[in-house]
Every structure is written in C-alpha cells, then in structure tokens.
Amino acid sequence: MHRIINRRVFFEITGAGVAGYFLSPVDLFAQSGSYYADATIFNTAKFVIFIQLAGAPSQVDTFDLKVGPWTPANFAPTTLNGVDFPAGLLPGLASQAERFSVVRSCQSSALVHNLLQAWNQIARNPASATGKIAPNIGSIVALEFEPKRNRGQNLPGFVSLSSAGNLVRNGYLPGRYAPFDVNVGPTGLASLTNADGEATFTDRYGVLQQLNAAGVSRSDFAEMADFYSGARAMMYDPGVSATFQFTTQDQLRYGNSGFGNSCIVARNLVKADLGTRYIMITLGGWDNHTNIYQVGAGIYRSAAQLDAGLGNLIADLAVMPGSNGGSKLDETLIVAKGEFGRTVGNITGQLGRDHYAVHSALFAGGGVRPGKVIGATTADGRYIESPGWSEDRAVMAEDVAATIYSALGINYTTVRRDDPLGRGFEYVPSTTDWRASPIRELFQ
C-alpha cells in the first residue's frame, strides 16, 4: 500500500523541519489504457480552481434567483445577462457578471451531503465498487500533468485549501498524487526552514542519502527518501514561501475569512505556476434548513464570504497577465457548485429550505465564454424546463468532471488498466443510459 500523506504527516515526518508529499516515481503514464477517439477536448486551461459550496446553497436565492414574496428586499434583484440576479446579496459577483457564466440545469443523483460532496470530487457514486477506490479529480489531474512538470516547479500538482473535512484523496493512485491540504494564514506555511538551520538539515539529509545508497534501507525507507526529496525541494525556496503568504490589505479586500484567504492563495498559486494544476477550496455553511433569511446569519454569512472571495479572485486573475497575450483568468477554469440544491417557493415552517436535486453552477475563465446562462428552470424553479445544452438532459456531476478534464486537455473517456479491481478505471464512468460529456455550450 502506498502511504497517504496529508498536511499533518507532511510536517511531522522528519521531526526536524518539513517533509514532502512525493512518493517514489511509478510508471503510471504508460498504463492509461484506452479511450474514445471522438471525445471533445477543448484544451483551453492550464489550471482549475474547484470551489465546493458544501451544504448546498439555495439556487433560487443565488444563481437561479426566483423572486417572490419570500425574497428579502436587500437582495436587490436586478437583471444581469437577461436573468434575475441578487445584486444586493452578491454585489461583488454582480460586478463581475460579464466574466462568468451559469448553468441552471444541474441535477444531483441523491440528497445526502457527504455522498454527493464526494460524488462531485470523483465523478461517480462513492458507494459503488470503483467509487471506493476512486481518486479525486485533482489527483488524476496531478497524475496527467506530472510528465509536464518543469525544473523548479516544486509544489504538488493538487493543492487543497481549507477542504480537509470533506476531502476525497488519491484513491488507489500513489500518494504522490494526493492533495496537499493546507489551512492558510497570512504568514504562510510553517516549518519551511529547519529550527537547527539549513546546514544541519542538509547534513541529516546527506546521512539518509548515504544509508539509502548503501542499500541499508528497506523499501519503506526508499519511499521515505522520496518524501525527503520532495520536502528538500520546497524548503528554503522563496517562491514556495511567498505563494502561501498575503498582505493584510488583500485579506481585508477578500473578506477577512478563511474562504477569502484560500482564494488569495489560489490566486497566488496560479500566478506562481510552481507545479500546481488543480486547486480545491471548500466553503460551507449553506445547509440552511432554518432561518435562511436571518440577517448576519443564514444565507447571508456564506454568501458574503463567497462574494468577496470569488468576486475578487475573478477580478484579480482577469487583470493578471497570462501567456499568449491573455490573462491568468483565460488560463484558469473556475467552477463553483454545491452538492445539490434547495426546495423552491415559500420557505418551510422552520423558515428555511430543505434538500432538492435541481441546482446551479458557476463557471468562469479557462476558455468559458462569459455572460452566458445555460439551461432554464420553470418559473417556480421546481423543474428543469430546458437543459440548454447539446445532450438535452440535466447536467450531472459526471458532466462537470468531463468539462474540467476537457478544458485541461485531458481525455475524460480514458480507461486505466492499473486499478486493483481489475475492471479498468474510467476517468468519468459511462452508463447504459447516457455517456458523460463536457458542456460544449460553455465554450462556444
């Protein structure tokens, strides 16, 4: 079994500095197996920022606003891109409306938080046989981009920011592709230097290398040596240290919250381009069964964090120079969605909204044509009236995953032949009824 490394182990494994997340290289790239030749591959993005809105936001109060007697006056409904939008609840995002698009025809396959949060991350039912071994989409992205890593790109391919509570890890893939999960703060990563000094650490590292070279170590120690190697590359690297730091000014501008801080670091990771290709952030607090419209709490608290964090992230990436004359936003696909939606119409007797399958998702950057609204629900939001895309059905989590892979230039129909079940592992599984597909209309 390959060792699973999380942030705690990363910092504890040496006892005298910091440890890497890398495991011994495995020749997985030759084991990709088969794929469909007719897959639609956009190849428009270098980075992905996936924002999981844990708890499931009410779509009829956010990205599929349905104005009724329940709508608070301070939502200030306005028309943006031809549809109603709560400009008072989400003013920062309202100001960026010409830089993102919304899909309103999403549907979940169940209504259980943990199950669907995992489903979003692995593009399949977590209770299925392959679901139990499935890697996070971010781990597969890290695997696919590993051969493209340049010298000096010392950060993990998959970084998770404030997502540890509901984070799916690397499944059956080696720990090399596990998420590096970090709770961010303005001073950055701790223990990137050795308390006894760089020279002492170098000496200790040298002794380990000598032991390994002499053949004294067991295979476990060989794996550990690779952890040290990855750690050594990150230590005393000013670029790595700076990427996880930010100013008080930025902290306040992004909302002075854990989510806002994570958005700042996500921006920095994209700007630095030190090897990270997939970034996951979790923003919880959307499980508003009671008092959804309580000012200062309910939906307002999470919405304020989302608005300041995501609004400024989009704005900053849009003016940050990228390659080929574009911006960093042009190179970065941002996806924000919950696991499902909330009941529609009047609120419940507990002044809240319960679980509901239909929901919406926000897409920005990475080749997405901005200002589009794909799909439509009925006037009350109860049903999908028009899917609005080429497959003419509801958009499922598998389709969102296919969209992410396609934007990154990864063939989402790939079937690997290295899984422990011997069944062949599909990046995005197909069923007898339908085959997952990227949302082409977002890019056209």
Image (cartoon, rainbow, N blue to C red):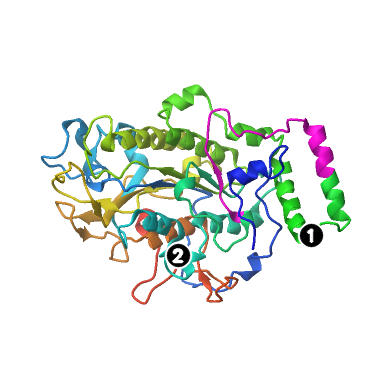
- Residue 239 vs residue 338, the one in the foreground: 338
Q: CA distance from mark 2 to mark 1?
A: 45 Å
Q: Quadrant of residue 233?
A: top right
Q: Secondary structure at mark 2?
A: loop
Q: Position of residue 414 (x, y in %)?
A: 52, 69
Q: Are marks 2 and 1 in contact (CB under 8 Å)?
A: no
Say above or below: 28 vs 283: below
Q: Quadrant of the C terminus?
A: bottom left
Q: Secondary structure at mark 1?
A: loop
Q: Is residue 168 left or right of residue 439?
A: right
**As shown in the figure, which amino acid type bears the numbered disc 2?**
Thr
Would you say residue 67 sits in the magenta stretch?
Answer: no
Which residue lies under the disc numbered 1?
A: 218
Q: Residue at x 82, y 41 (%)?
A: 204
Q: Hey, which quadrant is residue 126 in on the image?
A: bottom left
Which quarter of the figure has residue 418? bottom right
Q: Position of residue 12 (x, y in %)?
A: 66, 42
Q: In the rendered structure, does residue 190 fall within the stretch colored magenta?
A: yes
Q: Which mark is residue 184?
A: none
Dot placed on the residue nearer the N-terminal end, 2 or 1: 2
- Residue 40's label in the rendered image is 2
Around disc 1, counting alpha carbons within 10 Å, would you say few (fewer than 14), some (14 to 19), or many (20 or more)?
few
Give me the residue at 26% from left, 46% from top: 58
Residue 313 appears in the figure = yes
Residue in the foreground of this view, choosing between 126 and 65: 126
Magenta part of the chain: 177-206
Amino acid found under the numbered disc labelled 1 = Arg
- Disc 2 residue crowd, few under 14, some 14–19, many 20+, Cα 10 Å: many
Seen as rendered, the residue at the extreme top is 249
For marks 2 and 1, give the one nearer the viewer: 1
Q: Nearer the viewer, residue 77 or 215?
A: 215
